[in-house]
Structures are given as C-alpha cells and as structure tokens.
Image (tube, grey):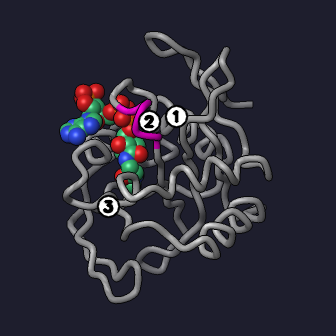
Amino acid sequence: MSKISERSKNHIIQIKPWEDKDLDLLFRINAPEMMNHLGGPESKEQVLNRHKRYLELGSKGCMFSITLLPELEAVGSVGYWQTIWNDKSVYEIGWSVLPSFQGKGIATIAVKLAIDKASSENKYKYIHAFPSIDNPASNSICRKLDFNFVSKCEFEYPPGNLMQCNNWRLNLIASK
Ligand SMILES: CC(C)(COP(=O)(O)OP(=O)(O)OC[C@H]1O[C@@H](n2cnc3c(N)ncnc32)[C@H](O)[C@@H]1OP(=O)(O)O)[C@@H](O)C(=O)NCCC(=O)NCCS
C-alpha cells in the first residue's frame, strides 16, 4: 500500500479518497480566485455533477481530498483520471489548494502522494498535467516533481474559451 500521508514543515498532509461529505469542499474550491486558470467558477449543477463524477470514477482513476492532521482540516483536492493522449491511455492529474493554505508546500506534497498511488497501480506508463502557461505555481509543481516538459498545447475549455497549456509528462514506472 503506498503512503497516503507525509509530514511538511508544520503539518501532516493526508490524501483520502473522495467522499460524499467532500461536496462542501468542492463548493469552496469553486471560488472565482481558485478557478482563474480553469475557465472560471462552475454553476451549482456543474459542481454537483463533478462531485458525482469524483465519487464514481471507479477503475478510471481516483480523486482525493487533501487534509491537514491533526486538525483534520480539508484544504484542497488532488486526483488522477484515465484519458486518451496521442491514441494511448494515460493518466491526467489535477490539483487545488484553498487560498489561505497556499504557499506552504501543501500541493507539492499532496501531488507527490497521488503520483505514488497512481504509480503503485502499474496501470499506465505516463501521467500528464496540463497547467495553463499563466499558472506559475502549477508549472513549478511539475518542475519540482520531475515531470518532463513536452510541449505547449491548446484546449477549448470551457467550450468557447481557448486555453494555452503546458503539457508535462512523468514516467510512472521510472518514478517508483
Ligand atoms: C496551484 C496551487 C494548487 C498551488 O498550491 P500551493 O499549496 O500553494 O503550492 P505549493 O506551496 O506546493 O507551491 C508550489 C510551488 O509554486 C510556487 N508558487 C506558489 N505560488 C506562486 C506564484 N503565485 N508565483 C510563482 N510561484 C508560485 C511556490 O513557490 C512553490 O515553488 P517553490 O517550492 O519552488 O518555492 C494553488 O495555487 C491553487 O489551488 N490554485 C488554484 C487552482 C489551480 O490553479 N489548480 C491547478 C490547475 S493545473
């Protein structure tokens, strides 16, 4: 079983598979300042659908809440899901940490814990992250966790909005 918690300077950071009670956390993540690089906040119905998708990912991946111990305070989300890239199945990973907890290294540790979990499954060779080119914190996380920069790419997300992203890729077999 891969590790699901790790000590930072001041806290223990734990990732836990997404639960029904995490809906409130998802609404807090859906704040305008959090969704700047992700196409803006979603409607209530979109958040409810996202929550349902997180709960029902099954064999297609896993979403986690990020919790600080011993306070048991929910501070963000991280997770990976199967997608197709260049005709091959790969994992894609995404992350969020609430504003008052940012800049403390929490996302970096939580993303590392999720990568360890994806790697332990032995399912896909690669995991990709596609942060916006204007998201320095997320691009820095990729760099620090030894992702390789592949190329810039463009996505239409949400429909009607073109996002310029960096394609970062990590070899899950080599990262063990
Ligand atoms: C991206 C995000 C998860 C980072 O969370 P965090 O817990 O603050 O990240 P960390 O503290 O682990 O910091 C990661 C790195 O980014 C750097 N960083 C943080 N904010 C930064 C900023 N505004 N500009 C430049 N670098 C920044 C940190 O310095 C750190 O690098 P370092 O260790 O080399 O100094 C958080 O800002 C967030 O949730 N943003 C909104 C949602 C989002 O954009 N999600 C990502 C979609 S790909």
Q: Is mark 2 within 8 Å of ligand 1?
A: yes
Q: Which residue is mark 1?
A: 110
Q: CA distance from mark 2 to mark 3?
A: 16 Å
What's under tag 2, amino acid-wise? Ala
The answer to whether residue 144 of the structure is visible from this angle is: no
Q: Which residue is mark 3?
A: 37
What's under tag 3, amino acid-wise? His
Q: Which residue is mark 2?
A: 107
Q: Is residue 20 above or below residue 114?
A: below
Question: How crowded is the residue under tag 3: few (<14 C-alpha within 10 Å), some, or many (20+)?
Answer: some
Which label lies toward us, 1 or 3? 3
Q: Is residue 119 above or below residue 165?
A: above
Task: Judge from the rendering whether residue 98 lies leftward or rightward of residue 73; answer left or right.
Answer: left
Q: Nearer the viewer, residue 43 or 49?
A: 43
* For marks 1 and 3 on the same chain, the one whose residue lies earlier in the sequence: 3
Which label lies toward us, 2 or 3? 3
Give percent across and percent down for residue 169. Answer: 37, 54
Q: Kindly give the residue lying farthest to the top in the view shown.
A: 10
Per the rendered image, the range of residues in magenta is 97-102
Give percent across and percent down for residue 149. Answer: 24, 53
